[in-house]
């Protein structure tokens, strides 16, 4: 067992760190304030391979492991949480199309998804189907060589500004087994988008509802076979949970770094804040919990890479733990900055707002506990 990054991983991390410092960090506050979606920067990220990190090589992706991708996303998240989180969703969409579409369909969509020229959204959640995603009602009805899609999705990241949608829709009444996945051009006739949702954080990417009214797509845009959609959606979410957990770890590391610097510089009662044991203990706990979160995320990524049968449970554990730790570390770092932590001149309040949603999406942390509890309570088996 080796816990050190290998040479390649260190090189990936360095490239990502440079991109984060040069192209994300200087702009992150402005993107947040003005709610700008930095599409040209996402294309630059595409040129470096960041938009298709684990997409198979035969489709033009880098075919990296989930562990490698996590190491890269962590560095990127230190530059801009919200933009990196969008990149992770785009990676999930690109991987799904490249893995499950028919060859001709892959050839149509993948080249532009990989470069970031086209951006992708993942459409699972509906107004009445959030945590209980398998109860979704958006329908896809086969008519000759077309599917006709009707229904609506909510909270869709990037929607209205992306070119490609991966849509989960019902092809039969058979619960989760009746859900199928489709790749849908975002400008297909009959698709309309809601207003850009005003949000607490994640402001460098738009969130909108999507309505499908008699949207007709070629039958070959079905991913895999009818009824496999929910399996794909959950497979996507295992990796998605690692990615979101990683965005929390990267952001929290950035917040902790800022706090460590601040306590050396800021003086009260005639001495640097760093001299107060109350703050030293707080910083020690933040660092310890952050390391534990990172290691759990990497363990879950490793399990997913190995095709370990327990991977889903570990991904849920990592997502729950790292997003809770990430939020707490950002909160404590803000506290250490005192009043300055609360004002926008410093990035602490943005970090706090951005990581909050990680406890909600890609399955809420209550749903993560449900997945873990179901597994640990299975009789006659033990999870190690
Ligand atoms: C900014 C943002 C971006 C998003 N992006 C996307 C996207 O790109 N694509 C997409 O498909 N979705 C997206 N989502 C949706 C997100 O995944 C859902 O909001 C999330 O899954 C929760 O669903 P819900 O909001 O309907 O809450 P609900 O399911 O209504 O849950 C409400 C509360 O009840 C709790 N709860 C529910 N069931 C149980 C239970 N059995 N036991 C205990 N507690 C329970 C939940 O944990 C939660 O606290 C996004 C959401 C946000 C806010």
Image (spheres, rainbow, N blue to C red):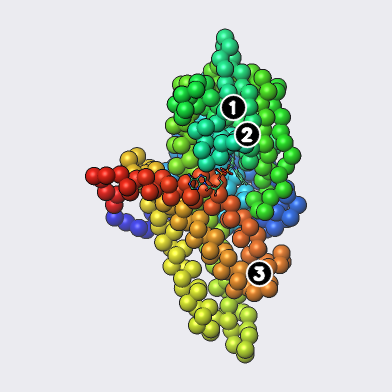
Q: Mark 2 — residue?
A: 153
**Is 217 placed above or below 197 here?**
above
Residue drawn at point x = 47 percent, y = 77 percent: 281
Query: Ligand 1 lies in which image quarter?
Result: top right
Residue drawn at point x = 54 percent, y = 81 percent: 274
**Is 190 placed above or below 159 here?**
above
Say few, some or many: other residues with alpha carbon within 10 Å of mark 3 (under 14 / 14 to 19 / 20 or more). many
Query: Where residue 227 sits in the image (x, y, percent)?
Result: 46, 24
Question: Does mark 3 have its CB less than 8 Å from ligand 1?
Answer: no
Measured in 3D between alpha carbons, the distance from the residue under mark 2 to the one under mark 1, in whole angstroms, is 8 Å
Query: Where residue 208 sits in the image (x, y, percent)?
Result: 68, 39
Q: How many marks?
A: 3
Query: Where residue 267 sits in the image (x, y, percent)?
Result: 63, 84
Residue drawn at point x = 46 percent, y = 63 percent: 290
- Mark 3 or 2: in front is 2
Could you tell which of marks 2 and 1 lies nearer the N-terminus? 1
Residue drawn at point x = 57 percent, y = 17 percent: 141
| Residue 72 visible, this orientation | no
Question: Does mark 2 have its CB less than 8 Å from ligand 1?
Answer: yes
Residue at disc 2, secondary structure = strand
| Residue 253 visible, this orientation | yes
Measured in 3D between alpha carbons, the distance from the residue under mark 1 to the one under mark 3, in whole angstroms, is 43 Å
Q: Mark 3 — residue?
A: 341
Say few, some or many: other residues with alpha carbon within 10 Å of mark 1 (under 14 / 14 to 19 / 20 or more). many
Residue 138 numbered mark, or none: 1
Could you tell which of marks 1 and 3 lies nearer the N-terminus? 1
Residue farthest top in this picture = 144
């Amino acid at each position: 067992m080796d816990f050190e990054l290998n040479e390649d991983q260190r090189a990936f991390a360095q490239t990502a760190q440079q991109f984060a410092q040069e192209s994300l960090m200087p702009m992150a506050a402005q993107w947040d304030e003005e709610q700008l979606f930095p599409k040209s920067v996402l294309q630059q990220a595409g040129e470096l391979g960041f938009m298709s990190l684990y997409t198979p090589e035969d489709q033009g992706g880098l075919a990296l492991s989930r562990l490698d991708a996590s190491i890269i996303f962590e560095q990127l998240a230190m530059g801009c949480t919200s933009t990196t989180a969008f990149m992770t969703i785009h990676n999930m969409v690109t991987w799904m199309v490249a893995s499950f579409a028919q060859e001709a369909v892959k050839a149509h969509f993948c080249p532009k998804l990989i470069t970031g020229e086209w951006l992708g959204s993942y459409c699972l959640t509906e107004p009445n189907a959030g945590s209980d995603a398998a109860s979704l009602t958006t329908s896809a009805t086969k008519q000759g060589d077309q599917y006709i899609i009707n229904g609506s999705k909510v909270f869709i990241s990037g929607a209205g500004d992306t070119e490609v949608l991966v849509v989960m829709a019902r092809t039969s009444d058979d619960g989760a087994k009746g859900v199928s996945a489709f790749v849908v051009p975002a400008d297909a006739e009959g698709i309309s988008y809601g207003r850009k949702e005003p949000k607490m954080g994640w402001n460098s990417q738009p969130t909108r509802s999507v309505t499908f009214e008699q949207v007709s797509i070629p039958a070959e845009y079905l991913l895999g076979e009818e009824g496999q959609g929910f399996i794909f959606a959950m497979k996507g979410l295992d990796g998605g949970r690692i990615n979101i957990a990683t965005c929390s770890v990267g952001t929290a590391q950035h917040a902790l770094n800022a706090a460590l610097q601040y306590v050396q510089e800021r003086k009260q009662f005639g001495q640097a804040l760093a001299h107060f044991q109350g703050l030293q203990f707080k910083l020690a706990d933040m660092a310890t919990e952050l390391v534990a979160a990172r290691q759990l995320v990497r363990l879950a990524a490793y399990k997913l890479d190995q095709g370990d049968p327990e991977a889903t449970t570990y991904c849920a554990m990592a997502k729950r733990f790292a997003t809770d730790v990430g939020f707490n570390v950002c909160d404590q770092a803000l506290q250490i900055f005192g009043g300055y932590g609360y004002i926008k001149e410093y990035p602490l309040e943005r970090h706090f707002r951005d990581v909050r949603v990680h406890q909600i999406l890609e399955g809420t942390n209550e749903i993560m506990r449900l997945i873990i509890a179901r597994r640990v309570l299975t009789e006659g088996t033990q999870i190690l």
